[in-house]
Image (spheres, rainbow, N blue to C red):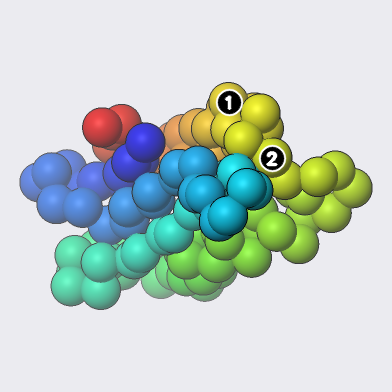
Amino acid sequence: MVMYLRDKGNETLLDVDCYVKTEGDCKFVELGSTVCIGPYSKLLLQIPEEEREHFIALFDFLQELRGWLWESHFATKKNTADEYDDVIETLRGILKGAATLFDLGYVED
């Protein structure tokens, strides 16, 4: 599943691709996240100065979602394909929360 954060002009600021990966006999949840630097930068320039640091910190976290997945989410449990739905629900919460904070659109594909 691919999840997006988009600005009011429907330009993608972030895309997160979450999927089940197979390596040999192992199946596990994997993800990649990409901040689209052009639209992100344009929006950053429009963010009120007092909110910019928060915006930057949020997108810094979002670009490192793969690290969050492995280092935090799966810190105390095994990463298996059975965990996919739980990861998706958690990601939805993170991304919808970010969308609400900065009045962004959230889209799933």
Question: Who's the residue at 33% across and 56% down the image?
Answer: 14
| Label number found at residue 5 | none
Q: Residue at x 44, y 59 (%)?
A: 32
In the image, which is nearer the foreground, mark 1 or mark 2?
2
Which dot marks residue 85? 1
According to the image, label 2 marks what residue?
Answer: 80
**SS for callout 1:** helix
Residue 68 placement (x, y as % from top left): 66, 58
**Amino acid type for the residue under numbered disc 1:** Asp
Q: Percent position (x, y) of residue 102? A: 39, 46
Please state which amino acid type lies under the numbered disc 2: Thr
Q: Residue furthest left?
A: 9
Residue 98 in picture, x, y percent from top left:
48, 44
Q: Is residue 5 left or right of residue 87?
A: left
Q: Is residue 88 above or below residue 36?
A: above
Q: CA distance from mark 1 to mark 2?
A: 11 Å
Asked whether residue 105 is in view, the answer is: yes
Instruction: Decide which of 92, 46 is in the foreground and name it.
Output: 92
